[in-house]
Amino acid sequence: MTATATILDVYCVHAATGTDATVNEALGALAARVPLSEVGASSVQDFVQSVPQAIAAIDAARGDPDDLYITTTTSSGVDGAIWPGNGSTGSVNSGQTQPLGVSVPVDFVQNLSLWDYDSASGDDLLGSIRIEESERGAGPIARLASSPGEGSAYYVTYRVE
């Protein structure tokens, strides 16, 4: 029986800038996978805010919102987005959580890609995660999706059942 992943929310640690090297270095030190129950955090926001070096760098950086959309493939295009859908995007700033409530089937492994829509040029990949069927029943998991080139970092929180 194929598993189903419910994508609970995304927390924007840092919106894309492409130029903040200090932030990129600090974000690179964040854990790539966080079993929230094991670190004693009630939310991914609580976890991230407990990492002082990353937060200090993020607070010092300039922040413009990302025009976020999410696909289950490695191809860009708002028309193929599972969130928000209907060819639209959601504006997300650093420090904001965006509730999603989207379900996707997971047959072994499912990719999720986060994109920043760009009307003037190609859309920018903000990061991707892999959701694994073997995570079924593990409770909420937060996985880091980041792009050193864009300077973006998002935690995607999901549950596999």
Image (cartoon, grey):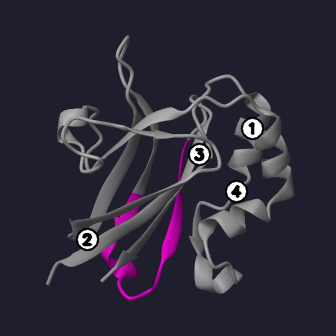
Residue 2 relative to residue 15: left or right = left
Of mark 1 and mark 2, the one earlier in the sequence is: 1
* Quadrant in the picture for the N terminus: bottom left
The count of marks equals: 4
Q: Position of residue 87 (x, y in %)?
A: 21, 35
Residue 117 relative to residue 16: left or right = left
Q: Are marks 3 and 4 in contact (CB under 8 Å)?
A: yes
* Residue at mark 3 to residue at mark 4: CA–CA distance: 10 Å
Q: Amino acid at mark 3?
A: Ala
The vertical placement of 18 against 9, above or below, is above
Q: Which residues are magenta?
A: 130-146
Q: Amino acid at mark 4?
A: Leu
Does the segment drawn in magenta span residue 51?
no
* Residue at mark 1 to residue at mark 2: CA–CA distance: 33 Å
Judge by depth and name the residue closer to the eye, 107 or 36. Answer: 36
Q: Position of residue 72 (x, y in %)?
A: 26, 51
Of mark 3 and mark 1, the one earlier in the sequence is: 1
Give the label on residue 31, or none: none
What residue is pinned by disc 2? 108
* Residue at mark 2 to residue at mark 4: CA–CA distance: 26 Å
What residue is pinned by disc 3? 153
Of mark 3 and mark 4, the one earlier in the sequence is: 4
Does dot 4 land on a helix, a strand or a loop?
Answer: loop
Of mark 2 and mark 3, the one earlier in the sequence is: 2
Of mark 2 and mark 4, the one earlier in the sequence is: 4
User: Quarter-wise, where is residue 69 in the image?
Assistant: top left
What residue is pinned by disc 1? 23
